Amino acid sequence: MRKKLLASALFLALAPMFSSAGETIHVYPVPGIFFDEGAENQKGVASKISPEIGKILKANIRQNVSYTGQAISKSFSNLTQQIDAKNRYRTLAVSVQVTRASRFEVNKKDGTRDIYLPLTLSLYFSNPMTGEVLQSFNQTRVTTFTSTPDTIAAKIAQYTQQGFERTLDELLTHAASQFKPYVVEAAVKDTWKGYGILDKGYAAGIGKDDILLDADGNEIKIEHAGQDYAVATPIGGKISSGNRYARTSMMKLSDVKKPRVLVVVSDGNANLPDAVMSQLFADQLGADAQFAVLPLNTNYGKVQSAIDSNTQIGSAVSGQRELPDYFIRLVVPDVVEYEKPTNLAYKTQRHYKSWAFAELLAKNGQVLFARHADEDLQDIVTNGIGIAAADRREVVLKNVLVELADKFAKEVKFKPTTLEITDAESGQLWVNDTAQVLQSGQAVRIYREISKDVLVPTWEARVETREGSRIALRTQLEIAGSPPAPTRGDKILIDQINSPAGGAMRLAYCPNPKNQVGSQFVPRYDELAYAVATQAGFNMVNRSLKGVVERRVGSASGFRTNIKLPEAAFDQCLESLYRIDRVDSPCEGDACHTRYKVKTAFRQKQGETVSKQMILEHTFKTSGYQQNIDSTQLGQLQHAELYKDADELLTQTAKNLFQTK
Amino acid sequence: MKKAKIAATLLALSMATSHQVYAFGLGDLTKAVTGASTGDLAKAVTGSSASSNVSGNDVDAFIQTARQADQLINQSARLIYLALASQEEKAKHEAAIQAANEISDVSEKKAKLDQINADTATALQKTLNNQETVKTINQMNAAQRKNLAASAFNFMLGLMKDKELAQRSTSLVSGVSSNPMLAPKLVNLKEAVGSVSGQVTNGVKIADGLISLAKAGNIKIMPASTSEKPMVVTEL
């Protein structure tokens, strides 16, 4: 046993060297610089490129493109300026994208201005044959300078150009140090009912949903990967014994067998580009996380068409790459900030509060894990001099993302579980699920063991009903080829996440348009109530995932051209209402606070009928503030603190409701 | 003005980066410097306040604290410097330290190390005045920020110890001088006093922004928000 472990560990360590021996992987710099201005299919995603700065970068586009080309050639060896039939399987495309280019300024008392120019560049490595984005990098630089108003325009132009070059240099240096591509080559050792069984698995770098190519550009898709074998199906065409397929990968071997996740930002903010937030979250997860995050370039379509028109690649991307089974939806709204006067006339306290939510979702919308976090920054401002607010907003947003990612890295546990089919009759299947792993409505895959320890996925089935520990499923579609119908003894493999959610009742959050009952309005209340509900133990589904993925991932990202996710099915609605009324604002000396009566309610509804509800009430007292506080600032303070308080009361309300029989 | 801004960055860093460091935020610094706190630091340096009755323990404690402060300041100044310096400057600094450590003559070695410490202080002062530094800090990751904040806090702590020590040193020296039993301790004590006042002069150059912010006055701490225990009701 120990020997076997050792051998596989050795194999794991040596595998990439074996497979890439003698293979030179070329790098093709995609001509041009791409601007992330929000694709047409991404309505509502604000561009982080200010027209002014974008114009400067575009006015110098020739210079910038040639600088980019030179900088790439300095950082990478094995460059090629052409992709053709000879090198197309061993060439990765590298493209540079401007993700953020904005400016803001702070007027100073002496008439000068501090100008800040945040610039974020992204670098993407992609496989030009399959359209797969393999790895991405971001680099941010904030150029700051002080200027008198008359010279600002000239200086911005100068510093923007300088900033571009420096950021690009840093980005490339970093990316080059992390650039470790390898080629995995596998042969079809056997075929079975239209499937091909490859002689290599995740130990060599082949994982589920990977696309491999043969020498003629025919694609196969991996349906299942064991340690030392993989099951593939052809994308158009046939798969035959002896055929050899290969793929260039950049994924760490330790990550290959982990479930793959795509991070999608559904609600962003004005300060950090979505791509930067996803990357920050993914980087922070680190190697210990039990899932691997796939890179996403929502503008990949532009890169691919540049490759097509500038090279002799002679092969069209088939657009068959599957989306992963899991998604993380990120909600990172704008920072709430306010300034409080202090007892010292020349000093004020500036507060920045961030709030963020992340949930791990299955393709069918089921919430598998969710957390939210908040962060708080306080600065003392003396005589109006403090740290630039935009800097602080960025810091407080990054902190909250880091905190969320830490929770995900530590708490999300995937446990591979196998269930066996006990009965099968004309499409109806039965399994014993004592551990309550399966959820009704869940789609699962049925596997046939074709030889010892070689499992082939044959059919997709859907969980229909549960009777105690006995689960009924119905077969839906064959995975590929012409597999035999599921029979007794076939297996179901699933990744069980954490402890199973409470009960078979699937709840969807249904926002009530009249959720504000009292006089005080809480912005983004439904988002908060939803976040709380997903962490209370309920078996929740997210009905918005389908739309978010179809809109945000889009067809220009190198995934399937026609993205369709199933509608999330649910049994009952969960809604939340609140009533907050101000009681009074008493002062002691110059220190005041505001008191509120706060009520929050969760209701479970079957159609229009309330089946269960819970209402909690308490009195809340804001923190103290000086009597002379500006009314706008006070409003922000009250909003921020009420949000936090509503969070706590909602959490208790949801907990009580969950425990109510 | 620029300096004050960077100082504020450092301070704010120590408040912002983590909860652990947050506990040592401005409020606590202010309290510690103005002596309003009854915390460990205040106890450590004001253990006995009657100047006429100086005991051997007082002197030992003083010397001990002075050495700690010395170490804290030099080490943290060095760490802050290293966190903010360029690769080239870092390499130069490390080389100088290594060269000094290879000197066999003890007093010469000490002189060399003292000189490096003074150079570091001057370089750090320059770095803190440099506009690039704000950018360096902005680009740090959470761990780097945390380290920098911890160093900044240690620096302030060392400086505060020194400040308290400097205030106490006069009475201590006169107390020791008038007590023949303590005469053997006088040499070490005077040396410690010398290091303390030197540190204060050098350190304040670096930290004037920090310290002036902290010393300028007490910001009244406003009460935090509170909520009552929730109860179940039937109507919204």
Image (cartoon, rainbow, N blue to C red):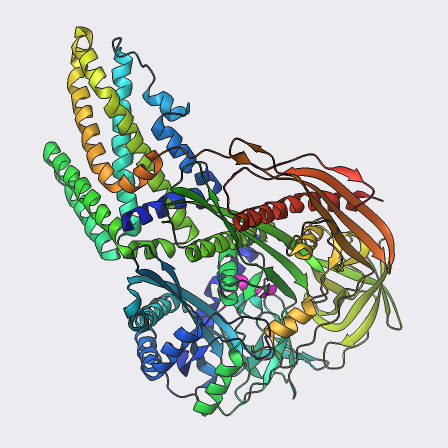
Query: How far across and down, in percent of the image, does residue A573 sit?
Result: 80, 58
- Percent x, y for residue A499? 71, 50
Residue B11 on the magenta segment = no
Q: Is residue A501 visible?
A: no
Question: Where's residue A94, x and y in %?
Answer: 43, 77
Q: Give the mark count.
A: 0
Residue at 59% from the left image edge and 62% from the top image edge: A258
Residue range in magenta is A251-266
Give B128 or B73, whichever is nearer the viewer.
B128
Q: Give the vertical position of A365 relative to A40 (above or below).
A: above
State the residue in front, B96 or B3.
B3
Residue in the picture at 68% in, 34% down: B228
Residue A489 in the image: above or below residue B143: below
Q: Is residue A66 something one can see in this rendering?
A: yes
Q: Quadrant of residue A202?
A: bottom right
Specify the quadrant of the image occupied by residue A118.
bottom left
Task: Provide residue A539's location: percent of width, then percent of height.
Answer: 76, 55
Which quarter of the figure is the C terminus of chain A placed in? top right
In the image, A63 versus B71, the foreground residue is: A63
Asked whether, in this view, residue A646 is left or right of residue A250, the answer is right
**Looking at the image, is A498 positioned above or below residue B193?**
below
Residue A263 colored in magenta in the image: yes
Between A246 and A472, the residue placed more toward the observer is A472
Image point (53%, 75%), residue name? A38
Left or right, A565 with respect to B175, comes to: right
Residue B168, picture quadrant: top left
